[in-house]
Image (cartoon, grey):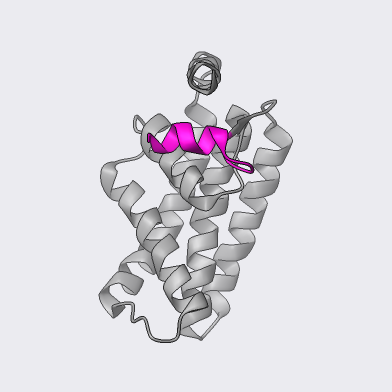
Amino acid sequence: MDKIKWCLEVKKGIQVVEPNKNLAEAYLKKAEESLEDMRMVKTRDWKIATAYYTMYFSVYAVLMRLGVKSEIHSCTIEFMKRFLSDYFSERECELLEDAFNARIDTQYYTDREVKDETINKIIESVPDFMVKCKDILLKITERETSEIRNVLKESKE
């Protein structure tokens, strides 16, 4: 089954809501706070978690601007891949997915190892990723917003 279709059908998956610039700003603020936390924490696990949440909140700010809600992180990432590909490269999508997986591996498991190379790549990329999302918020048009929302509504039917 198509992942987006599943995300549209499952509870707490992707929902079309009213676009909300105030919520977009609030999520950017959360991203900025997470970035600051990432820079301050010393432990590897929390550094990974705060790096991931900086990126996740940044992308979620874009979703709020578009009027798309998703409480399932993998659905948010799939939305990014499918509907924001004009803005994010495949590498950037993979980076968020790598950060998501690294956070899960370090937060929920004691026997899973995340390579230092992966962690360093994620941490080094976080500030640019957040800036990219801020840029998208400035560039995305009402026409693009309507098109994305219409495709989601049609896919749900």
Question: Considering the image in quadrants, where does the C terminus appear?
Answer: top right
Magenta segment range?
1-14
Left or right: 96 as drawn, with respect to 63: left
Q: Is residue 94 magenta?
A: no
Identity of the residue drawn at 53% across and 23% down: 156
**x then y, percent, for residue 7:** 51, 38
| Location of residue 62 with respect to 35 vertically, above or below | above
Left or right: 86 as drawn, with respect to 11: left
Q: Is residue 4 magenta?
A: yes
| Location of residue 133 with respect to 55 vertically, above or below | above
| Location of residue 141 with respect to 126 vertically, above or below | above
Name the image quarter holding residue 35. bottom right
| Location of residue 90 with respect to 126 vertically, above or below | above
Question: Considering the image in quadrants, where does the N terminus appear?
Answer: top left
Identity of the residue drawn at 45% across and 78% down: 106
- Along the viewing direction, whichever of 9 and 137 lies nearer the viewer: 9
Identity of the residue drawn at 59% across and 56% down: 31
Looking at the rendered structure, the number of numbered marks drawn on it comes to: 0
Identity of the residue drawn at 64% across and 62% down: 33
**x then y, percent, for residue 76:** 50, 44
**x then y, percent, for residue 68:** 60, 32
Left or right: 53 as drawn, with respect to 114: right
- Along the viewing direction, whichever of 78 and 124 lies nearer the viewer: 78
Name the image quarter holding residue 4. top left
Work out which residue is located at the far front of the displayed protein and give it.
Answer: 1
